[in-house]
Every structure is written in structure tokens, then in C-alpha cells.
Image (cartoon, rainbow, N blue to C red):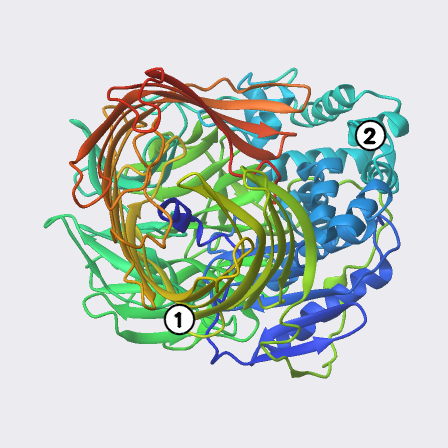
Amino acid sequence: MALLLMAQLANAQQFGGNPPSLHWRQIDSDTVRVIYPKGLDTTANRVAAIVSTIAGKNYHPLGSSVKKINIVLQNQPVGSNGYVGLGPFRSEFYLTPPADNFDQGTLHWADQLALHEYRHVEQYNNFNRGASRLLHEVFGQDGYSLAVNAAVPNWFFEGDAVFQETFLSAQGRGRLPSFVNSYPTLWAAGKNYKWMKLRNGSFKDYVPNHYYLGYLLVNYGYAKYGAGFWGKVTAEAAAFKGLFYPMQKAILHHTGLSYRRFIDDAFDYYKKIYGIETRPVPPAAKPTNGEEGLANYYYPQQMDDGALLYLKATVKQRPAFYIRDRMGEHLVRYRDISNETQFSYSNGKIVYAALEADPRWSWKTYSSLRLIDLRSGTQRKVTTRTRYFSPDISVDGKLLAANSVDLKGHSSLVLLDAATGNILDKFAMAGIDYFANPKIKSRYEVIAAVRQQNGDSYIGLIHFRTKKITPLTPPTHRPVGQISLFDHKVYFIGSMGLQDAIFSVDLQSHQIKKLENKELGAYFINASRERLHWSSFTDEGYRLRQQNENDSRWTNQDPNAFVQAASGFVSDSLPHAESPLNIAVAPRPSKKYAQLTRPVNLHSWRPNYIDPEYSFTVYGNNILNTTQTNLYYIYNQNDKSSTVGGSITYGGLYPYIGIGSQYSFNREVMISQRLRRWNQWDNYLSFSVPLSWIDGRLYKYLNAGTNLGYQHDFDQITTQPGIHFGYLTHSLGFGAQVQQSRMDIFPKWGLGIKGQYRYALNQWISRQLLAKATGYLPGLLPTHSFVLSVTEQESSAKYQLFSNQLNFARGFNAVSAVRAGTATFNYHLPLLYPDWGFGNILYLQRVRGAAFFDYSVIKENRSAPYKNLQSAGAEIYVDTQWWNQYPLTFGFRIGERLTQDLVVPDGPRLFYEFILPVSLIPK
């Protein structure tokens, strides 16, 4: 399990992810507390000012409730993200800006996060009503989260937030053709998927996610029904007015239309804008290699011999570099794990940015440079533990250029020695927010897509000697970027209307031209002597296009029209409002924020059931996520015992430190036909070091820990003193795996190793040693997997104080053994992808099967002979989504015992088992 989860480290909330050397400050008001690392005062002040302005003016309101939010600014990760979460109620901004201007746009990144994420705060503040409020009171923030996410779909949460970032700024994703064209691209290809497929996605087909869907529906709602529409709809939905399908019933109430009719009308509204009903958008050409299915080709670049180099990722294969020539397509190398798709090629060498992570402090990630020599087929690390993005390589292969972002968010262009990675020169300028897609023109000149702090961008020629920038295009709020330099022209992508199109600008005359092309989205332009290569966004991914330069038709662009042309769309039915981004920001008082502020911070209390135990747990986390607290009650339905306990873990130091205690009442067991009944008190103190990092193409982890435990049993039947003993548990685990593609059930290559040693600290000699290894190998077809595991456990013969941890062969009852081992052989494969659901309740994404063979060897005591347990069978798993949001997997197993069961030797040889999720209650 740990092996598969570690690949998610870049996206998960990080527990104990910042080192204790990081000093925190806070700006506190009645609306927001901004918590930030020392040195980010300017950013923190601006975030606080923007958020306070939005809260005070309450643009396009969902209600009038304002509850204070804690916003944590994270400057260590190189990823660009943000979230607002419950349990506890807080927000975190990942401050490193996106490298690609067409990803999130060119607004100042902290500004965009403030606009977008604070809309989620407004949503949570105003959806706390009716049944949602009741669950909030009864189960805390986790209960509230469950309620509002069941009542209000995720497409509204994100679509409404994208609308806010668009409505309250001159840009936002609603004005990016790269964002709004996803659904029109499907419609133009005749792909009118059913509603539940649009909501839940697909393993095999391109389905835009809930951000894209949500913006279209939210924008349409405002355009058609006015500024107050969504406030009224979500107020009724969150209150569960209409217990089942509250959102659908609220829309019916306020529009007179069924939910399906409302969706269809919204889609028809946009189809008319694009003219799809009467004039379909010309589809992009299929790739010349005849491949079908969902695949993305990034940054095609023509080589000197006429071959084409590109990065490709498919639903079946992880990203890799390929060369296509007259003989076909050839794999160069699987790319190291990276946040970027951009790479550059020249003189037989590829340079790109790869992701690195600090092993212990998971918030600290890096973007470092890798250089592939195509002649030798080798890759080397040019830099490590750096923050470089979107690198380029000079014609002679000796010079690199990259954008650098420091921990204060300042962007600079750096020139590097390609052999050593040493900095040769550096350029930065006040008012410049980011240097995207740099291209080397000469030793002292670089062309880049320059973002200004006000959100404008332009193509600029940067002079390292004079420390000046010559704008080649006028600044505009519409994104420009993805540059290619050839001869005396700069080719780039720019947004205009509903298109992302190919442009060029002459280095001498600064004349801007636009390539005549009716496709909605052209990206990753590359110009060579005779041809233009790019990728077109299609219903099957980014697909390769090429065009002879002599056959290309270009039209001159007036500079004023180039600047003023609109792009994307946003409803104009709402009253015009002054953007909160235009406010004057005055310095606010700042003070220290202690890492252990409110260390317990209880926020949720919820029931759970994991057979055979019912539980009720109270959860706590502090805002910086360095402490975790659990208080719990457990009822075991097998032995009718009850347990109360609690634990707290501190993750702010290099080792995690945990302490816990629990008391169990009325435990009982039959031993040699005699009933033993007792109460049990358990205590522990633990130290662990969880390390996870990225090593080239592998995610890796190394976990080491020691647990000191003490158990005291109080016998209820006899008056004899109860058993009490201490014990130590030492554990060590290591794992490594490659990235998974979308269709992979398990990693194509992976390894997990675990060792554990437990022993008693008293007059009894009791020990237990456990060792386990799991391997993941590719199957016969790209989406098939072999999973092999071997486990061995050895326990003391006389005093067996420790419970069994080894899984016996499937279908067999467990028995006590001094020595046991199990080997399992599993083959997993997908069977079908239904992409079908009903009633907005259950959606079937994938049905997969597995064949298994298990072999166990056990020795019940020192003098007993070894006994073999063997079974074989098959499993069926169904990967589902419930209520369009909650993923759950269910399975069924049928097998045959090939040897006798030791507990029930005369039992049936065939066995059947249902495989249920660990928990049916979403977190």
C-alpha cells in the first residue's frame, strides 16, 4: 500500500513537511490569518488585502456569512497549486508560478490563488445551512465536508471559483482558449458523451474534468439567469431542500427546467457561440503513424537529418522521448519524473527540467536540469536541488538558459555552463514576474515570454550585457508563449478570440503575423528551414501537425488590435466591479507564528466500521499540519470488548514522535476449553523517520521506526496478578516504483521490502521476525501486471506474545505457527471499461480481473513437520464512482484449496469471498 501511495506525494497535504528551521510569521485580521515563512511579507500583505477586499465587497454573493480562514503560504514546493480544505478549515497556496503561460494564464500567481481559493472559502462559509449544518454540528468538519460535497457537485465548486478569478481580473482561465475549448473540441468531433461520463471521466477517452465543465455551467447560469442565480440554487441545495438530488431540484425550482434540460441548454448555448451546429470545426489530422486512442505529443522538434523528436505520453505508457524517421517511431528514453512537458533540443542533445524532492521534508521540492546525449544514449545531471524551469540549449550545445524562481518568488533568467551547471550570467528586472519559455539567440541574448506583475505578457529580447529588454510584441492580457526561434523570426503561440493560434514576429521590423489556421488550439510550435511543426489539441489529445513553410499563409496583425482583442468568454450579466487586484496595499502588522500553535485543534468526530470493529474517533490537526491527534472508542463485535484510547504524533522534528494509550474492557478468549476474561491497558512511544524522494524515473521511500510498548493485563476471573510486559518493535521498509500511466493497474516496475522485529522486555523470551518483499512487473500487454510477493514470519515457540501478521494462502484459516511463509503469484488485467452509470448514484469505470496462486508453508511448533497450504483462483474487481465523486472498488474472489485446511480439514475445497473497500465512509 505504501508503495502505491508514495506516488501521490506531490499532490497530498504534507504532514510534517517543513523543517523546524523555517520561521513562520502571521498577518492577522478578523477575516483572514495569513501564515507565511519569514521574508514573504510583501506577498502575505497582498494576499491579506485581496482576501479582505473580496470578503468586504462580496462580489456575486452566495450569502453573507464570513468566517475567518487560515491561509498558509508555502514557498518550498516547485509545484503550482492551492486548495481550501475542511478537517481542519484552512487553505494553502503553493507559490511557485506555473511554467507554461497557457496552463493557468499570466496573472501574478499569488493574486490568482487569492481570487480562486477565497471563493472556496465563501462557498464553505455560506453552504453551512439546513441538513449540511446539522451534519456539521453532529460530526464536525468532516461531516460538513461529506454533506456539502453530496449536496453541491464538485463541478460547481471549481467552476464557480474559476468564474471568480475570471470575473474579478482581466484574465483568469475563463479567458484562456486552452481552457474553454475542451468541450467544443469534443462536440466538433461528434463526441456528445452522456452526463455521467462527463462527471466521472474515463480511463480510455479524453473527458475534460470538473473544472472545465463547471466553468461552462456556472458562466451560463449567470449569463442566462442573472447575478443572484447560483446563490439561490446552492442555498437550497446545501440545505437539502429535497433530500434526494438537492442540486437538481434547486435548479428545477429556479429555472422551471429539469436538470438534464438545463445542461443541454447550456451546451447548446456554447455550441452556438462556436458555430458547431452549422459549421463544425475542422478536425486536426490524425498522427501519421496511425496510432489510435488517447495520446499527447509535446514540443515536436525537427532534427538536422529531418527526423522528428518529441515527448509522448499515452494512457498506456508514461512520458518518454521518441524519434520518428522513415523507419518509424523509436523510443529514446523514458523521461525522468517532471512537472513540465517542455524540453529543448540542439546539436544532438536534449535538456529538460526534472523533479527532485527532499527525502524528509516533503514540502521541499526542486526542479533540476537533465541533459541527454543522443549520440551516446546517456543522461547526466547538470544541476541538483535547484529551482530552474523551461531550459533551452544553444546551437553548439555549450550554453543553457533557464528561468529561476527563488524562495521569495522572484524570477530571473540564468545562463549556465552546460558542462558544469555553473551560473555564467543572470538577469532580473523590477516589475517582471516570470520569464517563460526562454530561447537562446546568442551568448548574451535570450528571447522569452515575459510576464509582468500586472498580468500582461509579451515576447521580449533580453540583453544580458546592457541589462535591458526589447519588447518584440506589445504587452497584452492575452497569453503569449511557447517560443521557437528560427532565422530572423520568433514563432510563438498567442490567444485571440476562441483560438490559440500560431504567430510570428520579425526581429528587425517587429511585424506580427498570424498563421491562417482554423483549428481551435495550436501549441508547441517549432520552426525549421522548410517546415512548421506543432501539436493540435483534439478529442484524442495533442496530435502532431506539420506544414511546409512555403504553403503557409500569414496575415499581418495590427499591434493595437493584437493587444485589444478579447479571448475566451465570461458573462457580462453581472454588475461591473472594480477588481480587488487594483487596490493599494498598505503594510499590515506582522508577528511570529509558533509552529505548535493550537497543537490539538480538534475538528471532526466520525463513526466508522472495519470488520469486526465499530469505532467513533475524534480527529485533530494543527494548521501547519505538524501534529495529529486521535481520541477513539472501539467496539469489537467478535469478543464484545470495548476500547477507549488516544494518540498524538508530532512531525515537526526529523523523526516523527508519537505517544498513545488505550484501555480495553472485557476481552475474552477460549484457551484449552477454559475461558479467559481480562481488561488490557496498552501504551506506546514511537519514533519513526519517513523518507520519500524522487530519483530520476523512480519514486522511492525508506521508512525506519522503533516503537516501545507496554501491555498490562488485568485478569477478571482469578485473583492472580495480571500479565504485564514491555516490548520493542523495530521496522524498516524500502520501496521504489516508476510512474504509472492512466490505465496501469499497478506500476510496470516496482519493488517493496519490509522487515520488522518485535521482542518482549521481561522474563519471557518472546520474539517475532517478519520479512516481506513485493515485486511489480509488466505483463504480456501494456496494461497488464504481474504482482509477486514473498513473506516469512518466525516467532518464539514457548511464549507467543505477538499476534500473527502473515497472510496465509487465500481461502485458508490462520493458525498459530512458530514459522510460516507465503508466496503469492498474481496476474492482473483490465477486462472492460464500461463508462456507464445510472441515477447519478453509481458509475462503473473499469472491470478488471486477476488470477492467483498462493503457496504457504507453516510449522506449528518446533517438533511439528512443515505443512503446505496451496490455493488458486480468480478475482473480479469493479472500479466505481459513487454520487459522481467517491471512488470505491469492490471485488469477488473464487478459488480452490489445493490442500486441506488445518482448522476445518473436511471443509469444501471451493471458497467464495467478497472483497470490500477498507472503509465505505469517504474522508
Q: Judge depth for marks 2 and 1 and give the one in front.
A: 2
Q: Position of residue 439 (x, y in %)?
A: 36, 58
Vertical arrangement, residue 790 with respect to residue 906, above or below: below
Amino acid marked by disc 2: Leu
> In the depicted view, which residue is nearer to us: 204 or 376?
204
Secondary structure under tag 2 reads loop
Using residue 115 as the reference point, say whether residue 836 is left or right of it.
Answer: left
Amino acid marked by disc 1: His
Disc 1: which residue: 463
Using residue 760 as the reference point, say whether residue 628 is left or right of it.
Answer: right
Disc 2: which residue: 243
Distance between mark 2 and mark 1 Cα atoms: 64 Å
> In the depicted view, which residue is nearer to us: 468 or 303?
303
Quadrant location of the C terminus? Answer: top right
Residue at 34 percent across and 44 percent down: it is 739
Vertical arrangement, residue 675 with respect to residue 59, above or below: above
Residue at 65 percent across and 30 percent down: it is 883
Quadrant location of the N terminus? Answer: top left
The circle on residue 475 is: none
